[in-house]
Image (cartoon, rainbow, N blue to C red):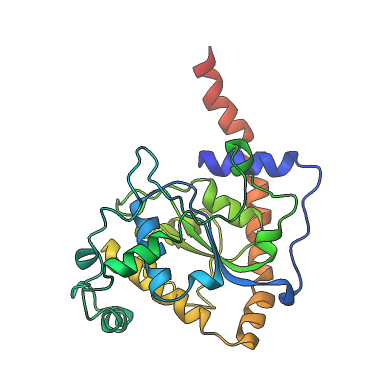
């Protein structure tokens, strides 16, 4: 069983009231929602790519000013020339298009670096209590109602270990479509648990890309493509994904009752 999935399902079942998700496209103010309360290299890299593509202004994107365990600035140790000079690592055609955008390895100079650093910390909300941060449902739910798609930056990315934390389940609990920024085959694993994803609406082949740098750049390219959708396409996406997000929510909520005995049988011997 998935421990975080189980805990999130338990929380959903214990809530007295779950807010109704937004059913009005005109309430959507930003295209993307991306929570990054803790520093991870791939989260910083994606922030740089969102900045490069001009996506920060159309996103709720949080990012700390310092890395988690020390006072190092998030951008201090990034090797832009290495991280964003993509090689011929895949036949996937989007790679070629992405390479064209980053023909020059000189993506950022010192002035642009200072400009980028000045945007941090990027804050979505004022929550500082960890218990509030990890709650599945925000009773106000404003940030989910005001954004079109969650970009879930999971804890693991550069390793091969797929590990779904509360970040993934929180998007599902809030009935939000998502792009999953995780190790190769993160979506494939999620689907093996019974959840549905969004390949009918955008290209999810990023999930098959083995090289993490290439995978991240293709995800950023996908986000830019989605941002370029006209209003009618965004409205259709908003309306037509309701059945998927509702299905995923109901599946997540059912986990607690379906697996409660399994979990308790596993835990009880450890307690004695």
The percent position of residue 224, horizontal first and vertical second, equals 45, 78
86 sits left or right of 223 in the view: left
The residue at 65%/53% (across/down) is: 173
**Figure check: 107 above or below 75:** below
Q: Residue at x 55, y 73 (%)?
A: 58
| Residue 21 located left or right of residue 114 | right
Residue at the right extreme of this rendering: 16
The x, y position of residue 252, in whole percent, is 63, 50
State the residue in front, 85 or 62. Answer: 62
Residue 218 in view (yes/no): yes
Q: Is residue 198 left or right of residue 235?
A: left
72 is higher (above) or lower (below) than 181 = above
* Above or below, 107 relative to 272: below
Number of on-image labels: 0
Q: Is residue 134 visible?
A: no
Residue at 29 percent across and 78 percent down: it is 95
**Near-viewer residue (192 or 70):** 70
Residue 7 in which image quadrant? top right
User: Which residue is drawn at the image coordinates 56% and 59% (left, top)?
Assistant: 195
Residue 27 versus residue 262 in the image, above or below: below
Drawn side of residue 218 relative to residue 191, left or right: left
Q: Position of residue 192 (x, y in %)?
A: 48, 56
Q: Position of residue 51 (x, y in %)?
A: 42, 70
Residue furthest to the top in view is: 272
Is 123 or 167 nearer to us in this picture?
123
Name the image quarter holding residue 249: bottom right
């Amino acid at each position: 069983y998935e421990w975080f999935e189980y805990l999130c399902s338990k929380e959903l079942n214990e809530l007295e009231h779950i807010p109704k998700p937004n059913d009005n496209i005109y309430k959507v103010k930003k295209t993307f929602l991306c929570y990054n309360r803790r520093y991870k290299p791939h989260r910083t890299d994606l922030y740089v790519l969102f900045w490069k593509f001009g996506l920060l202004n159309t996103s709720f994107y949080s990012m700390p000013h310092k890395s988690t365990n020390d006072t190092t600035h998030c951008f201090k140790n990034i090797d832009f020339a290495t991280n964003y000079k993509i090689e011929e690592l895949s036949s996937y055609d989007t790679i070629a298009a992405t390479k064209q955008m980053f023909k020059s390895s000189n993506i950022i100079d010192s002035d642009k670096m200072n400009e980028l650093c000045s945007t941090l910390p990027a804050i979505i909300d004022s929550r500082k209590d960890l218990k509030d941060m990890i709650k599945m449902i925000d009773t106000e739910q404003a940030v989910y109602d005001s954004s079109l798609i969650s970009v879930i930056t999971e804890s693991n990315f550069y390793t091969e270990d797929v590990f779904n934390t509360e970040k993934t389940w929180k998007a599902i609990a809030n009935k939000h479509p998502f792009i999953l920024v995780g190790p190769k085959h993160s979506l494939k694993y999620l689907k093996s648990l019974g959840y549905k994803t969004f390949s009918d609406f955008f290209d999810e082949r990023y999930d098959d890309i083995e090289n993490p740098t290439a995978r991240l750049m293709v995800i950023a390219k996908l986000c830019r493509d989605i941002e370029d959708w006209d209003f009618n396409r965004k409205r259709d996406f908003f309306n037509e994904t309701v059945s998927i997000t509702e299905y995923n929510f109901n599946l997540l909520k059912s986990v607690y009752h379906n697996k409660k005995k399994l979990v308790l049988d596993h835990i009880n011997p450890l307690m004695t």
